[in-house]
Image (cartoon, coloured by chain):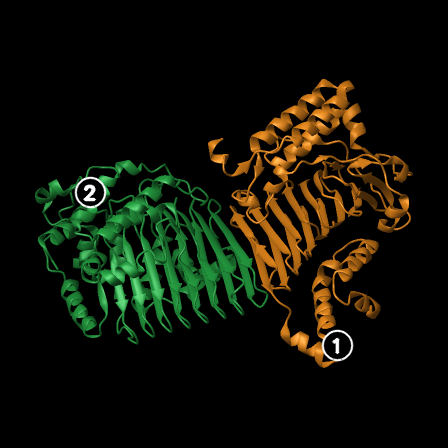
Chain colours: A orange, B green
Amino acid sequence: MSALRNRTIEPVPAFAEALERLRGEAAGSSGRALEQRNAAFERFQALGVPTSRVENWKYTNAASFANRPFALAPRGTVDSSLIIPHFAGGHKARRLILVNGRTIPQFSHLGGLPAGMTVRPLAQVLAETPELVDRTSVNDEPEHSFEALNRALVEDGAWISLEDGVALDEPLQVISILTEAESAFMTHPRHVIRLGKDAKLRLILTTVALGQADSLMNQVETVEIADGADLTIDRTLEQGQGRSAITRSRFVLGSRSRLQQTTASIGGSLIRHEMEARLRGTHSEAILNGLMMPRGTEHVDTLIRMHHEMPDCQSDQFYKTVADDRGRAVFAGKIFVHKDAQRTNSYQKNDSLLLSDDAEIDAKPELEIYADDVKCSHGATCGDLDPASLFYLRSRGLDEALARSMLTFAFTGEVLERIADESVEHIVRRMILSRLPGGERLAELG
Amino acid sequence: MATALETVREYTGGEYKYGFVTDIESDMAPNGLSEDVIRLISAKKNEPEWLTEMRLAAYHRWLTMKEPTWQKVDYEPIDYQAISYYAAPKIKERPKSLDEIDPEILRTYEKLGIPIKEQEILAGVAVDYVFDSVSVATTFRKKLHELGIIFCSISEAIQDHPELVRKYLGSVVPAGDNFFAALNAAVFTDGSFVYIPKGVRCPMELSTYFRINEKGTGQFERTLIIADEGSYVSYLEGCTAPQRDENQLHAAVVELITLDDAEIKYSTVQNWYPGDAEGKGGIYNFVTKRGACRGKNSKISWTQVETGSAITWKYPSCILQGDNSVGEFYSVAVTNNRQQADTGTKMIHIGKNTRSHIIAKGISAGTSDSTYRGLVKILKSAEGARNYTQCDSMLIGDKCGAHTVPYIEVRNRSAKCEHEATTSKISDDQLFYCRQRGIPEEDAVALIVNGFCREVMDELPMEFAVEARKLLAISLEHSVG
């Protein structure tokens, strides 16, 4: 471990105390579940919290989390009127609501699911049939410190399973609410999503923070997309001051399967989204789109590992970034083409707008390629708004601020139009406009 | 100041010997690195006190440092205590004539059209001769001297121009910069020194190739080039022919400094022994090259064609400090068999309106790995900075790897950064087109690869460009079919 010594730091006892509390509560549950928690926690301690000396955390300082005494999130619920504005996917959409990482059945609407589709609180599944969770193919020993921590301290999450050939016509929305609180808290939700052969699902993942709090959401998602299955995800994540979120999504795709995800990580004290997609079957396709928009002192970080493990697959990464004030955005996308993955087509694009001299953009678009019959490319750009376009708008009577906002909004448009669900698109549009000076006037202009 | 000591040193700096073996045995340091060895090197070279101190400080720094492991190369651990840092202790039997040289290497010389005398030097054949270049070099030096240009070995410069060396040595690559730079600072034995005075445009390409006394001192080479206000120099490093070399580890440091309105063009063709097809032997080329554009409107341009060495680890960089300064990096890295190359550049934009341009072409064949690793950093002060980066990789065969690891860090909104990279295999259509017109497959590959690298080749000075083109073809022999 000596090599790791200055690359990681030891976490404060608060994490161990949280584990102790969960152990006490789960006195009645199976010994194996407890064993797994203990093993994961040991793993977390052995890995330590990464400092910026660890390559994958070069631009994002997670070390501060190790020193902060987060307690487990307070239980309870919120007034439904605070949740309703975040409904998306139309009135027929099914919904699963989580508050501070725990499912709230009375707010959820999961009636009339097709036969062969189950949506349950993960806590239930873990308590009754933990072997089901174990069986997911993305369940190996975590090499990732926050994933290990999640496994040690997970309380609940969404369990979504579709048998072969099952399709849900309407979207399924999972809304994750974080409440306000006096003292710092953390939550470690875990979502397990499994699509059987030729299954089809449109998923909307919404994360909302209400009011003020110092919180850390450390979420892990394991997503299996079997042969021929099709998963579409629209994801929004907007957190306020003091809010941090680390999300780690691991996708495994079978033959002829498809994943399309569009993410709007608008802002938060520290937002980190890691995605790992493994194309394990031939002729599959993975598309990851996203928008990051930090302002104030926000920090938004996206890390993608796209693994082409089999031939004839396609992937596309398309990320846009707008950094204002003292905001900082990080994009580290990597295309990894394994030895046998011939005839891979893989693209990556990251365009960034830097709107202030105090903002910062860091991009690390990587290619690692071991097969020769491939077409891979990446492009990254960074700059301010185009002066000619600005001049054009100014010459037509728009004031500087509005002209800038209009061009910035147009810049985000390419991501907006990739959002699959119209109601989510409207929500994201609103989120973007609310962050731009004169945004309400732009909204009126349509 | 060619003292007896100096002469001895010159001939003991490396492996190319003229029969002084018995005379110099007592001068050789034991294997390993210690304060005593460094003091010995310094004393042998009659160095001033400050330089000895500098070396020792670097050595102590080195002791606290770890060998970097982040680069994408694999090699057996190097035993730094098994190396002699002053004159190699064992002079191996050297070939007596070209007949004893690997015919493969001779064939390459032939293809490059190298005269027989030069072939002998390159192959390290122990013969007495008067090599034309020696006289050529002398003529050159006289002419340069008239213009006030200083072009000599760094050891001579330390003796003759200590004020210049002291002012600039280690100012671009400080001893603590990295593991290999620290090692170099502690033990460097020779290298080149160039000073171009104010307003002088150097009338010829300066080259290590013509500085015969330089030969075989390459293991821990130290190069320092200073272009004073308004001056210009083009410097060529290396040589297009494969060099027989006993040293496994090469840890050189190159520092370039341009003052106001000055320009340095630094071109490298590196074709050291890459090891055999199974990856045995070959040079580890761990080099730190960095240029500082200190003055306004200054320019540093790096061009490199890397075809040799078992492992290449180098990132020629530019610190763009002066307003309106320009940094350029043009690179072709070819790897075949089991070669590994991890190379790229760093462009640090500090001054206003600084510009940088990066073109990197990587070609991998056989079971080799080639990585572009680069950093473009635009600091807050770099108002109006501009960067354009293009990295293209070509794969020949399905057992090689090509990787791109760029870092882009932008802190000024008026800056514009563009980066693009592509990876693809050699085009079947283009190959077919050539084959259909009766061009043999290997020639066709060479043709296509040369086209792929053209943007970089065009940057090479004429003398190099012609041979570099041939070299590309030779490096890729047997990589298809």
Question: Under tag 2, what secondary structure?
Answer: loop
Tell me: B364 left or right of A150. Answer: left
**Residue B34 showing in the rendered view:** yes
Q: What label does residue A398 carry, if any?
A: 1
Tell me: B439 left or right of B37. Answer: right
Q: What label does residue B367 carry, if any?
A: none
Rate crowding at label 2 as few (under 14), some (14 to 19) or many (20 or more) other CA atoms within 10 Å: many
Q: What is the x, y in percent for residue B382?
A: 51, 66
Rate crowding at label 1 as few (under 14), some (14 to 19) or many (20 or more) other CA atoms within 10 Å: some
Quarter-of-image position of residue B473: bottom left
- Kindly report which numbered mark, 1 or 2, lies closer to the viewer in this rendering: 1
Label 1 sits on what residue type? Leu
Q: Decide which of A307, B143 is in the foreground and name it.
A: B143
Q: Decide which of B65, B465 is in the foreground and name it.
A: B65
Q: What is the x, y in percent for residue A272?
A: 65, 46
Q: Decide which of A371, A3 is in the foreground and name it.
A: A3
Residue extending furthest front? A182
**Which of the chains bears the disc numbered 2?**
B
Quarter-of-image position of residue B40: top left
Q: What is the x, y in percent for residue A359?
A: 61, 59
Q: What label does residue B88 carry, if any?
A: 2
**Residue B240 showing in the rendered view:** no
How many angstroms separate mark 1 from mark 2 (CA)? 75 Å
Label 2 sits on what residue type? Ala
Q: What is the x, y in percent for residue B67?
A: 39, 41
Pointer 1 and pointer 2: residues touching (CB < 8 Å)? no
**Residue in view at x 71 percent, y 78 percent:** A394
Q: Decide which of B222, B114 is in the foreground and name it.
A: B222
Image: B147 above or below A220: below
Q: Quadrant of the N terminus of chain B?
A: bottom left
Question: Under tag 1, what secondary structure?
Answer: loop
Asked if badges 1 and 2 are on one and the same chain, I answer no
